[in-house]
Image (tube, rainbow, N blue to C red):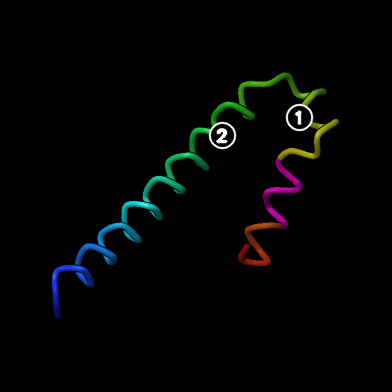
Amino acid sequence: MNGFTILRGMQHYVGKVRTMRNEIRTQRFLNTLPADIRKDIGWPDMYAERRIRGN
């Protein structure tokens, strides 16, 4: 196993962590919106369906 393989694995891991943090930040922001606006954009219904499908 050379250094490039290790580096690629670390970059992949850091990318996944960054994606998870961005999703959590987005969820928190959307949850602070008024209920009528959340309903208009389909939150959390759209997100729940996405999680069930595994996207």
The quarter in which the C terminus is drawn is bottom right
Mark 1 and mark 2 lie on one chain; the one further toward the N terminus is: 2
The quarter in which the N terminus is drawn is bottom left
Residue at position x 79%, y 24% from top? 37
Q: Which residue is mark 1?
A: 38
Q: Which residue is mark 2?
A: 26
Residue at position x 40%, y 55% from top? 16
Is 9 located above or below residue 28 in the figure?
A: below
Residue 22: image location, x then y, percent: 48, 39
Tell me if residue 42 is in the magenta stretch.
no
* Residue type at tag 2: Thr
Choose between 9 and 54: the one closer to the eye.
9
Magenta: main secondary structure equals helix
Residue at position x 81%, y 34% from top? 41
The boundaries of the magenta stretch are 44-49
* Residue type at tag 1: Arg
Tell me if residue 46 is in the magenta stretch.
yes
The crowding category of the residue bearing disc 1, from other C-alpha atoms within 10 Å (few below 14, some 14 to 19, many at least 20), is some
SS type, badge 1: helix
Residue 8 image-quadrant placement: bottom left
Residue at position x 68%, y 48% from top? 47
Residue 19: image location, x then y, percent: 46, 48
Choose between 43 and 4: the one closer to the eye.
4
Residue 36 image-quadrant placement: top right
Q: Is residue 45 left or right of residue 23?
A: right
SS type, badge 2: helix
Is 34 located above or below residue 26 in the figure?
A: above
Q: Is residue 21 left or right of residue 40?
A: left
Choose between 24 and 5: the one closer to the eye.
5
**Label 1, label 2: how far apart the Cα atoms are:** 13 Å
